[in-house]
Amino acid sequence: MLLPEPPRINLKGTPREIGLHHGHALSSQIKAQIAIYTEMFAYTSKLSWPSVLSLAEEFRVSIQKLTPDIYTEMEGIAEGAGVNILDIVALNCRSEIALGKFSDGCTSISWKKSGDERVLAQNWDWTAHVKRNLALMAIEQAQKPTIYMVTEAGIVGKIGFNTAGVGTCLNAIRAHPTDSSKLPVHVALRLCLESSSVKDAVKTLESLGGVASSQHILISDSKTSLGMEVSPLGNVYLKENEAGIITHTNHFIENKYVDEPPWLSGSPIRLERIRQLSSELVKEGFKGDKIVPSLLREKVFSDTYNAPQAICCQEDPSRHQSVRSSTLFNIIMNLAPENSSAEIVWGQPGSGKEGPVLKMPWT
């Protein structure tokens, strides 16, 4: 049975125009996301949706103040979808409002192919309920790079790259505290994807006061990769190892600014596993043009060691259905000057049930 392909949405114009088109095109998916997260917040955090919206109001004020164009876009999404602005803010702040009680998985890697070319890739693990509400999105804005990303309906920034060759991956971290005066991580991801370089992205986030929750953003351009272990209390930036590689899962490796109790037992095992698998490829002589998406899907991202909490994550039937994670897609980006692209596999790579290889850009 072939998996249905995600919608491809082309957005262009002013922030309001982009938001309206997003909201109209994905109205039913946005409303479905609100229903899914209503159940998830009730189960994980004992929060009703009205309580979630009350917390979202604190972030709404900060988003409007710090990133007025992105806030205007959110207003357009809300109007286009026929929902309240706080519904859209809540979706974009869902990681912060949950106080780390959601259990996103995800395993990511960046790999230097040459002096001016890098591969950036990850499996994205989350509850299967949201899969039907994901979309491939292109965003064209005046005087900014065009963005290509995979995102949840209603969310303004996530995993992808831009025409300046900047790409982002995300690994969720569970740690206190959060700070509603700072940038929600999905807004931070959008700012990264509007940047012309890794250096520019770091400067932008720091100038706006940093990120509201603990997260790992793996960011690359064609010449640089950084593992940004961000938190409201301080950031730590991980650099490439001697093989030109950065790997990450769902716990902080070096950031000691926040209190991060052990919460996802498979995360250290996945980290050790992706380091082992990538090291083996290096020893076998894979470098430069040999580092292709099919190789990484076959040798790294289809790996099921320590299932269900594997790199290719399987559903754990012992967990509540609202937080039962599995790998929903794999994305492998090739970041090169003026010629960046990505391959996406919908479903679990190597399972025999995944969909076809999808391309970004798609035109």
Image: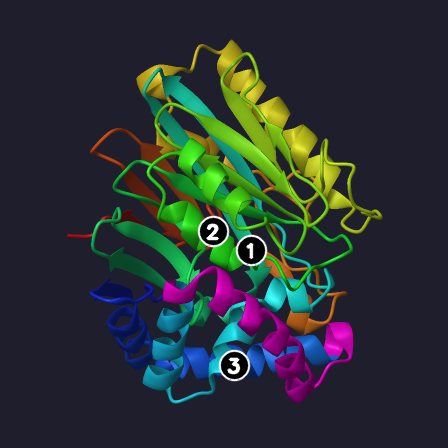
Whether pointer 2 and pointer 1 mark residues with C-beta atoms closer than 8 Å, the reply is yes
Q: Give the class, few, some or many, for how many residues have Cα within 10 Å of label 2's Cα (few <14, many ≥20).
A: many
Q: Residue at x 63, y 73 (%)?
A: 58
Magenta residues span 43-69
* Image position of 88 with respect to 297: above or below: below
Cα distance, mark 1 to mark 3?
17 Å
User: On the picture, is 360 further left or further right than 56?
Assistant: left
Position of residue 285 measured from the top left corner of the image (x, y, whole percent): 44, 10
Which label number is shown at residue 185? 1
Position of residue 44 measured from the top left corner of the image (x, y, whole percent): 75, 72
Determine the secondary structure under disc 2. helix
User: On the picture, is 59 further left or further right than 74?
Assistant: right
- Is residue 1 in view from this perspective? no
Q: Residue at x 49, y 42 (%)?
A: 122
Most foreground residue, 27 or 309: 27
Q: Residue at x 63, y 23 (%)?
A: 276
* Residue bearing mark 2: 189
Looking at the image, is mark 3 or mark 2 earlier in the sequence?
A: 3
Q: Is residue 26 magenta?
A: no
Looking at the image, is mark 1 or mark 3 earlier in the sequence?
A: 3
Position of residue 137 measured from the top left corner of the image (x, y, whole percent): 31, 60
The kind of residue tagged 2 is Leu
Coloring scheme used:
rainbow
* Residue bearing mark 3: 87
Which label number is shown at residue 198? none
